[in-house]
Image: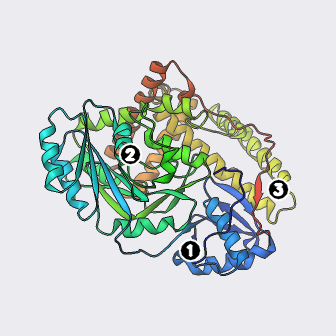
Amino acid sequence: MSTNAPSSPAPRGLPVALDRGLVFRAGGRVVTGGAPWAVALFKEAALPHLAALRRAGRAGLSPGTTVGRVLARQLLDRGLAHPVPAPRPGPHPVTVVVPAFGRPGELDRCLASLRGLPVIVVDDGSPDPAPVRAAAEAHGAHLVRHAVNRGPAAARNTGLALVRSPLVAFVDSDCRPEDGWLDILVPSFDDPKVAAVAPRIVPAVPLCPTGLLARYEAARSALDLGQDQALVRPGARVGFVPTATLLVRRDVLRDVAFDEGLRLGEDVDLVWRLHDRGLHVRYQPRARVAHTPRLGPRDWARRRHEYGTSAAALADRHPGRLAPARPSAWNLLALACAARGHPRSAAVSTLLAMALLRHRLKGMPGATGLSASVVAQGLVADTVALGLALRREWWPLGLLCLGAARRSGAARVASAAMLAPLVAEWVIRGPALDLGRWTALRCLDDLAYGTGVTASAWHHRSLAPLLPKVRLPFPHRPAARRTPPTR
């Protein structure tokens, strides 16, 4: 399916609900939000339908007219709304594929959570195959074995070749879906554009964890993407979903199988290739899957490092999408002036950016307030993104800034960009950790990932995953998109 092909209306009877992050302006005609974030201008014909969706809230509603269904499709395609079909009891046309490499105890618990479903276990060359075979046989799973370890992508493809059901669920052996997970996920496919849907992956730690890393994982697991539903695509709030558990239409995988050349990052690659075909991948956090985290300090840090090592290979396959930051040139100028101790120049740069955006939004209702809001949000977002890059991909420079913060104003600004978002996270999340330990673990988390990125850049002799992508101050594309129902 081509991304440029016109979209058909949303299916009849599919309820949709507006995304919680939308901001309405100018009497509801102008909306900011979506995936990725943008400004949308609606025509008068759309306003009654938008008002009805706003009144419906999170429960959503099913559009009853062609205009409403066309609008619903446009909202779904831009991440401004999400499908909210009711859970549907099974049985469901799903086969589960579980790649396994050792860890028979985890596999046994995983298979127990999948009772009643057809399951294919792919032993990816475990050194001792007997315990894996015993666990599969105990739960009536079909077992396939690789003679040598070929990686999780190859294991999933091997299992996929044996699947005959319309839907296939990939579940890692250290995951345990909660009861009713398919009842929540399967109705997502009522939208024919949905190719895959992912549940929320939550760490399997006690309600009151005692270990330091257990408390950290409970508050910020690398696999937990939060409690809000999302359209998953590059540049969006949720840019990818892990394939620790993923439900997919089998037919779309005939052309978009897992890339067996990737030992890590194969989940990112799959999601982005599905997006490039004009298909939707959705994150549905109402369905939950427990995952066993690695809580040994060495294993925890090694795993974070391994995540980063996929960066260069992904950057080669998806040019431009792995840039550690995408700041606006105007925001870079304002931050540079602030770092050099020239706040007035920084303010002038920001005001000039607002004026230019106001000119581009000429004729849009509430253009002055909208331009000020967009520039302010962009400045904050770019500052946070640059701080994250200094903690991760640019970690050597980040360490230098932290070390020089007492002597250099520019280093203090950079250090504030690195650390202030962590303080805000601590306040918002309320983890069972004091601020000092939270900040230290967050920095170690990012540092471990960042060393993986630099290692992959060195190995591939590529700077692509380390280079920012600066947005020029005079883009040729329009600042806002019109989203009118055509009839």
Looking at marks 1 and 3 on the same chain, the residue that comes earlier in the sequence is marked by 1
Gap between marks 2 and 3 measured at Cα: 52 Å
Gap between marks 1 and 3 measured at Cα: 34 Å
Looking at marks 2 and 3 on the same chain, the residue that comes earlier in the sequence is marked by 2
Taking the image as shown, residue 387 lies to the left or right of residue 118, namely right
Q: Is residue 456 above or below residue 365?
A: above
Give the residue pinned by disc 1.
14
Other residues around mark 3 within 10 Å, as few (<14) / some (14–19) / many (≥20): some
Disc 2 secondary structure class: loop
Is residue 209 at all visible to an observer of this figure?
Answer: no
Is residue 155 at all visible to an observer of this figure?
Answer: yes
Q: Quadrant of residue 29?
A: bottom right
- What amino acid type should be assigned to the residue bearing mark 1? Leu
Taking the image as shown, residue 423 lies to the left or right of residue 127, namely right
Residue 190 place in picture, x, y as percent = 52, 68
Taking the image as shown, residue 25 lies to the left or right of residue 82, namely right
Gap between marks 1 and 2 measured at Cα: 31 Å
Give the residue pinned by disc 2.
161
Tag of residue 361: 3
- What amino acid type should be assigned to the residue bearing mark 2? Ala
Residue name at image x 37 percent, y 52 percent? 163
Tag of residue 256: none
Q: Is residue 64 above or below residue 350?
A: below
Residue name at image x 64 percent, y 34 percent? 469
Residue name at image x 13 percent, y 54 percent? 138
Residue 140 place in picture, x, y as percent = 19, 56
- What amino acid type should be assigned to the residue bearing mark 3? Leu
Residue 30 place in picture, x, y as percent = 74, 66
Q: Is residue 309 above or below residue 479?
A: above
User: Of residues 334 and 280, which is closer to you in this image?
Assistant: 280
Quarter of the C terminus within the rendering:
bottom right
Q: Nearer the viewer, mark 2 or mark 3?
A: 2
